[in-house]
């Protein structure tokens, strides 16, 4: 592809990546001239080729059954004290008790306060929050059966997991509960309870009885949303309402960077974290991403420039959004001023990743005013964007690098969507 050709680049500008992935959105009607065979990915904005996705679910194939959360390197399995702490009412008390239980176990093993703090920090805040929610449900189950939640037997753990299965929970969710129990309960036969042969076999039974499902078709029509973004009330951008400007900016950044909502929430507008270039805007992510590990960290997130059609240019939207929210930042705390995305309501404080997720879902649903579109998740942009890129000629290596995936199997197993040939021919 000619370097001067305008495109919706998903790679990093100016030698940040070896090659760029481009999501090219043609402003014209379908034309084979506009379809590049290399790293350009045309996505027409023509309403004539609208495609309403239907959902098809098929059983997913798990290559390694035993690769469950409780067996990850992050799991620490100390023997816990038999002391039964009091459970506070309310989510805050439950969370403190869950983490305090683990901390007490470290103390019983003789670790100093400083060491215990670092051991506790091995779980990221998201994991701690997830464990706390699961622990609360587990304690509730134990309470109705008069079971000591900190000293449950192997049989009782099996009964709890069976209860979760009968409640309709999926395999991966139940595996998450198993991981939590491994960190909270005492070991059985010098083995974390979640890795005990009986529990491992039980979870395999969950897998066989309710195998994970994979969505083959896109959950919604990307082109339908892009068409909407070029009309009123989303244009002209100078007159757009702040809320709609926020929706448009978040959606375009999400669909072109392939990143999670938590990644978008971490973006900052400070000069040391943001650099504006001709080909786009490069951000340095604050903190660790979900997939970051000791051996891997990708802190750069690139928002590509798209000069073919300013109405779909994420950089144009982003700069306009920063300009519109500048007056709100001066009244915020110094740390809050640098956060990119702010609430659309007063006092316009920085938002959470959950709020960003809701914005993306709301944006998608606006394209379906007469449809009861259900079960749409913001995370679907992380699947649909790369799927369009792949089917329109982008190399798998470039997609993996842009989305920060470690292997091709991750994309193929969890994110790849099947786009019909008829639809592709109209783009």
Image (spheres, rainbow, N blue to C red):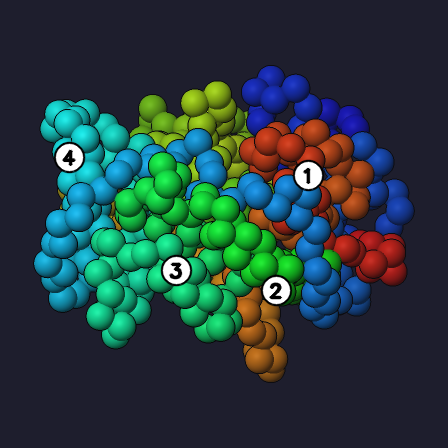
In this view, 46 is above or below 285: below
Question: Within 10 angstroms of label 4, few (less than 14), some, or many (20 or more) residues?
Answer: few
Q: Quadrant of residue 137?
A: bottom left
Question: Counting residues from the N terminus, which is met first, the one under dot 2 or under dot 4?
Answer: 4
Numbered circle sitting on residue 108: 4
Residue linked to disc 2: 210
Question: Counting residues from the N terminus, which is met first, the one under dot 1 or under dot 4?
Answer: 4
Q: SS at mark 4?
A: helix
Question: Counting residues from the N terminus, which is met first, the one under dot 1 or under dot 3?
Answer: 3
Q: Which quadrant holds the C terminus?
A: bottom right
Numbered circle sitting on residue 409: 1
Numbered circle sitting on residue 155: 3
Q: Is residue 334 left or right of residue 380?
A: left
Assess whether mark 1 and mark 2 are in contact (beta carbons under 8 angstroms). no
Q: Nearer the viewer, mark 1 or mark 4?
A: 4
Mark 4 and mark 3: span between their CA atoms?
25 Å
């Amino acid at each position: 592809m000619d370097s001067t050709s305008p495109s919706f680049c998903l790679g990093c500008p100016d030698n940040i990546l070896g090659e760029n992935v481009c999501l090219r959105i043609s402003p014209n009607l379908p034309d084979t001239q506009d379809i590049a065979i290399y790293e350009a990915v045309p996505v027409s904005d023509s309403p004539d080729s609208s495609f309403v996705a239907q959902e098809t679910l098929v059983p997913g194939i798990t290559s390694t059954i035993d690769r469950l959360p409780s067996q990850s390197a992050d799991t620490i399995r100390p023997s816990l004290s038999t002391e039964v702490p009091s459970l506070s009412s309310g989510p805050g008390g439950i969370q403190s008790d869950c983490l305090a239980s683990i901390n007490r176990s470290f103390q019983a093993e003789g670790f100093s306060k400083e060491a215990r703090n670092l051991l506790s920090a091995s779980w990221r805040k998201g994991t701690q929050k997830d464990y706390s929610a699961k622990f609360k449900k587990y304690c509730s189950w134990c309470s109705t059966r008069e079971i000591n939640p900190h000293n449950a037997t192997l049989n009782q753990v099996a009964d709890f997991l069976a209860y979760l299965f009968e409640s309709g929970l999926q395999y991966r969710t139940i595996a998450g509960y198993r991981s939590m129990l491994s960190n909270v309960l005492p070991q059985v036969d010098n083995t974390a309870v979640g890795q005990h042969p009986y529990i491992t076999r039980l979870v395999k039974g969950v897998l066989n009885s309710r195998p994970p499902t994979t969505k083959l078709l896109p959950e919604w029509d990307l082109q339908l949303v892009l068409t909407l973004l070029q009309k009123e009330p989303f244009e002209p951008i100078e007159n757009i309402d702040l809320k709609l400007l926020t929706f448009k900016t978040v959606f375009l950044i999400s669909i072109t960077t392939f990143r999670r909502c938590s990644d978008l929430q971490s973006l900052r507008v400070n000069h040391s974290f943001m650099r504006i270039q001709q080909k786009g805007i490069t951000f340095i992510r604050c903190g660790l991403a979900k997939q970051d590990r000791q051996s891997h960290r990708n802190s750069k997130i690139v928002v590509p420039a798209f000069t073919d059609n300013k109405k779909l240019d994420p950089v144009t939207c982003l700069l306009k959004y920063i300009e519109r929210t500048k007056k709100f930042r001066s009244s915020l705390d110094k740390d809050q001023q640098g956060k990119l995305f702010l609430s659309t309501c007063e006092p316009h404080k920085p938002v959470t990743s959950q709020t960003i997720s809701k914005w993306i879902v709301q944006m998608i649903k606006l394209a379906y005013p007469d449809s009861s579109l259900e079960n749409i998740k913001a995370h679907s942009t992380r699947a649909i964007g790369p799927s369009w890129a792949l089917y329109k000629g982008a190399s798998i290596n470039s997609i993996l690098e842009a989305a920060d995936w470690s292997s091709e199997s991750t994309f193929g197993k969890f994110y790849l969507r099947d786009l019909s040939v008829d639809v592709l021919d109209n783009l």
